[in-house]
Image: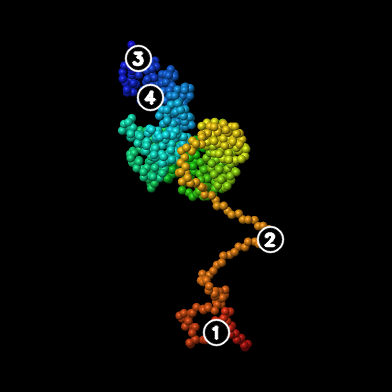
Amino acid sequence: MPQSLASLLQSSSIVDDDEVLQAANAAISSNKNDIVAQQTKVVALLKLDRFDDAIRFIAGCGDSLASHCALEKAYALYKAGQIDEAAAIINDSGDNDPRFKHLAAQVAYRAERFQDAASIYNELVATDDDCDLKINAAAVSAQQEWLGYSSKIGGGIPETFELCYNVACFEIAKGNYDEATKLLQRAATLCKASEDLGDEDKQAELRPIWVQQAYVYARQGNMKEALDLYTLLGSTDDSDADFAAVAKNNHTLLSGNTENPYIQQREMEAVVAAAKQAKLFSYQSLRLAKNVYVTDLNAHKATGVRSKTRKELAKETQPTIQSNYTLAGVINAAASVNQGTAQTAIRTLQNATTKRSLDVGLVLAIIQLQLDQHRAGAATATLESLFTRLEKIDTDEARDVRYSPGLVALSVSLMKKHGRQNAAKAEFSKAAKHWIARKDAAAYSSSILTESGVQLMRSSDTDELKLAGAAFEKILERDSNCEIASAGLVASLAVLDGSTAAKHATELPAVEDLVDDANVDALLKAGVAVLPGQAPTKKRNAADDGNSAAAKKHRRRRLPKNFVEGQTPDPERWLPLRDRSTYRPKNKKGKKKMADSTQGGPVKDEETLELVGGGGVKVEKASGGGAKKKKKGKK
């Protein structure tokens, strides 16, 4: 009778996964219904990174093995990129096993549901102080910051290079580049000092640290230091497709040949080829697509860019504010007016709105051109025209676009530029009412609800205070740990509902905790930043009565250039030049003077003219009319 797999494994010391797989296959060939052997084979395939083989084997063994290996199947689907199928298995399991929760968090992270992933990791970290959980939780927080969602990471100095690296990415997303540099340098030091890694593994772990440090240097304008790191890195080819795509893209842009755009365009084609094998996040794919479009435009391939973006726009029903379609609209507009003047470009794009009236990217391109020409009024009219078209479409999707955070922020900014403060507040009110009433509100609605609540709670109007409180309550329904929403709710309800405000006030952090790490001396030394304001104009006092003399405008005295203090001015200064006593006509020179001489010539009749200031001037006497011709006598 053949031995079971369990007895075989107990009587041997197998450390190689291939050998475990061979032993499992041998046991299964003897007994096809050996569930332990089947599970062992699945685990061995997973450890060998043969995820597709594991999925096929589980499917071939029927429901019995699938029910016993639900976790393994979900993990295999997750690693194979079948995120939705993995999430479905996890949801159907309904298991509170921490292993399922950990996998559920990883699936949510890969599906870019970072809020869900953060919630799961916070729950796991609260009950388990495992370092891997902290590392993954830090990665989730970094991704939330990249997408503009508020998040936080527990304090303390990271003790492992993985955690240090993820915290550095979190600081990069927040724009704290100096702090990120310190953390990346610490991560590199910890990695080099690690006793658990061999030399090859250390070099593999250092490569992403160097790429992130090069990105930080580039953001700080230190291009030479960034390129030096890529020289240290060597080739950007790597077995990790994600790393290769990001490194190639960044290196190409840093060392791009601006003098010859065709070379840079060819290098970007290599980046695209590497990205096809990678599993980039949506915001990474969006930036890569933008880089490809821009390099194509620089290489004078506007026709191809127009064709690609037109096909991209045709995939989605307008209106939409999805980033890839908005980008396609902007790039299509740029390709349509490539190398044209601003005024010509505006006319061309305005004509294009007759066919694409709901294309948000196209409208934003027009507004940008108008603002570049300092035509804020025309830009406001263009945006309001888009709002009018969106409001005519009575669908939730159109209203979501109308009150999207970006468009509301642009509208408010233009209104404030014209001094329309009340109109800006009304815009916030309408946006808040829409997102409060929306049942399945998008995740990005929290940002506009927060800003609307902050603006409305400053009002003394009861209705606006109630609306602000409702906005903060809507945020707390999704994220009960949002401290900004809790503080805003307390502030807005302090006058209207004191008991409710007091209840939420107890959940706020203490003031001492908020200012515990504040450097008072540094704040005092830095001073207070004040925005430059408009100089106040002096208001004229109204006239007391009609009898007061009208204010006369006094002319500034203008003195002659040759004025000398104390010298009596010339009394003839008001006379024409010829009438002054000092006037002397210009002497005739040369032959003209000789012709006027009296020797051998007729004597001119002259007379002396008396001048007003005294003296006289000799002038030639006018001759009388010519002698009259004698009439001929009659014969």
Residue type at mark 2? Asn
Residue type at mark 3? Ser
Residue under circle 3? 4
Q: Nearer the viewer, mark 2 or mark 1?
A: 2
Q: Nearer the viewer, mark 1 or mark 4?
A: 4
* Residue nearest the viewer, comparing 343 with 577: 577
Instruction: Residue lying at the far top in this picture: please name it.
Output: 1
Task: Measure how far apart labels 4 and 2 are at the Cα level.
Answer: 101 Å
Give the SS element for disc 2: loop
Q: Residue at x 39, y 45 (%)?
A: 222
Residue 431 visible somewhere in the drawing: no
Q: Residue at x 55, y 39 (%)?
A: 454
Query: Could you tell me which quadrant the C terminus lies in?
Result: bottom right
Residue type at mark 4? Leu
Give the SS element for disc 3: loop
Task: Measure how far apart labels 2 and 3 are at the Cα level.
Answer: 121 Å
Q: Position of residue 185 (x, y in %)?
A: 37, 38
| 222 displayed left or right of 382 | left
Task: Measure how far apart labels 3 and 4 are at the Cα level.
Answer: 22 Å
Residue under circle 2? 547
Mark 4 is surrounded, within 10 Å at the Cα level, by few (under 14), some (14 to 19) or many (20 or more) other residues, namely: many
Q: Image quarter for residue 139? A: top left
Which of the two labelled residues, at mark 4 and mark 2, occupies the earlier sequence position? Answer: 4
Residue type at mark 1? Glu
